[in-house]
Amino acid sequence: MTVQQTRRILPVLAVAGLTATLLLTGCSLQERVCGSGRYPVKAVGNPDGGDCVADGQEPPEGWVRYPAGQVPEYVGDEWDRYWATVTVDKDGRMVSN
């Protein structure tokens, strides 16, 4: 194999290796709503409001937890899109859709 052929094939091998690594390790290219050790919360009275709170801590005043099974995990996932259209009260109940 010539040097010129090697230079052409190296980028292809690098991309293939990166792809295989991502697939085999289960890495996702999706952005998580919250980082490790944090969970998402919903703003009271604001359909677009969201933040993250440290695990083990209660949401601060003006924020509520999402209902179990309806917590957004990734930016743009089903629940992230849904909750961006809903306003809740201080008890987490929907007040508008």
Image (cartoon, rainbow, N blue to C red):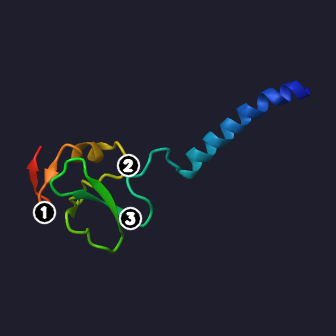
Q: Residue 22: x and y, percent?
A: 58, 46
Q: Label 1 sits on what residue type?
A: Lys
- Can residue 1 be seen by looking at this rendering? no
Question: Which of the two discs, 1 and 2, labels the residue nearer the N terminus?
Answer: 2
- Mark closer to the chain start, 3 or 1: 3
Q: Nearer the viewer, residue 55 or 6?
A: 55
Residue holding disc 3 = 38
Amino acid at circle 3: Arg
Q: Which residue is mark 2?
A: 74
Viewed as shown, does residue 84 lie left or right of 13? left
Q: Residue furthest right?
A: 2
| CB atoms of marks 3 and 1 within 8 Å | no
Picture quarter with the N terminus: top right
Picture quadrant where residue 88 is located: bottom left
Please give left or right for residue 29 compared with residue 8 in the image. Answer: left
Callout 2–callout 3 Cβ contact below 8 Å: no
Question: In the visual, does 55 lie left or right of 26?
Answer: left
Estimate the x, y position of residue 53 in percent, counting from the top left.
34, 66
Name the residue at 90% across, 28% down. Answer: 3
Kindly identify which numbered label has been placed on residue 90: 1
Q: Tag 2, which secondary structure? A: loop
Using the numbered discs, state the Cα–Cα distance from disc 1 to disc 2 in whole angstroms.
24 Å
In depth, the one of 27 and 57 nearer the eye is 57
- Residue at the location (12% across, 64% down)? 91
Instruction: Using the image, determine if residue 40 lies above or below residue 23.
Output: below
Q: Residue at x 11, y 52 (%)?
A: 94
The location of residue 57, given as percent across then percent down, is 31, 73
Considering the image in quadrants, where does the C terminus appear?
top left
Q: CA distance from mark 3 to mark 1?
A: 21 Å
Left or right of 37? Residue 27 is right
Q: Is residue 46 visible?
A: yes
